[in-house]
Amino acid sequence: MRYTAKKYLINTLRGTFIVYVLLGMGISTGAFAGGHKSAPAQPDIVDTAVAAGSFTTLVAALQAADLVGALKDKGPYTVFAPTDEAFATFAKHWPGTIENLLKPENQAQLQRLLTYHVVSGKVMAADISGTMTPTTLEGGSLSITTDNGVKVNYATVVQADIDTSNGVIHVIDTVLLPAETQ
């Protein structure tokens, strides 16, 4: 039996078809609906902060304050998130304060500080005009202005509108302090 170019091509195509069929069996049925795979789920506030890599102090504080579960909740929430650099500046002005707040016996104070950075609802930068005074989860209020860029109390928003599955993160350059601790 002679092996012709035609037979070679047919056998190659059969082999390729079988490989694609076998590979296709591993694809979910959702891939065939509409002809494409669905997009992966968008991360929540906590997972977004962890992935960013510039909020390690904030994430450690959220863990110590037992607030991770709350910020993974449905929400929506708006978080004014101080960077590691903001926490470092805070630590220079008030040495030992962060370490002290991370102790289990100071969990309530840490919760108060962190929930002062969170507002219920999803407030995007485009939603802000003039001066706003939203109430925080801590119970105090923030002063948000747009006069010279976006300011939250005395902090500057350095990156706005990091969208998450359960709200939005606005990156700020300063740790915010509730009224009684300023």
Image (cartoon, rainbow, N blue to C red):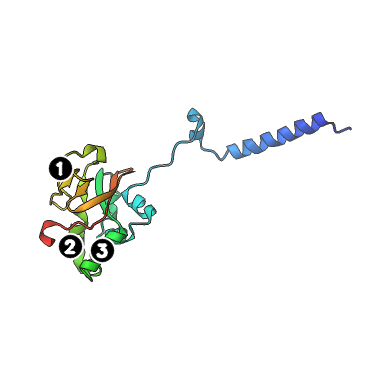
- Graded by Cα atoms within 10 Å as few (under 14), some (14 to 19) or many (20 or more), the crowding at tag 1 reads some
Residue 156 visible here: yes
The Cα–Cα distance between marks 3 and 1, rounded to whole angstroms, is: 26 Å
Tell me which residue sits at (20%, 47%) in the image: 119
Tell me which residue sits at (76%, 34%) in the image: 11
Occupied quadrant, residue 134: top left
Residues under numbered marks 1 and 2 in contact, where contact means CB atoms less than 8 Å apart? no
Q: Secondary structure at mark 2?
A: helix
Tell me the tag on residue 109.
2
Residue 158, position as x, y percentages in the image: 29, 50
Tell me which residue sits at (17%, 45%) in the image: 145
- The residue carrying mark 3 is 89
Observer-nearest residue: 141 or 115?
141
Tell me the tag on residue 132.
1
| Amino acid type, label 1 | Met
Occupied quadrant, residue 42: top left
Disc on the earlier residue, 3 or 1: 3
Residue with the most extreme bottom position: 96
Disc on the earlier residue, 1 or 2: 2
| Amino acid type, label 3 | Thr
Residues under numbered marks 3 and 1 in contact, where contact means CB atoms less than 8 Å apart? no
Q: Secondary structure at mark 1?
A: strand
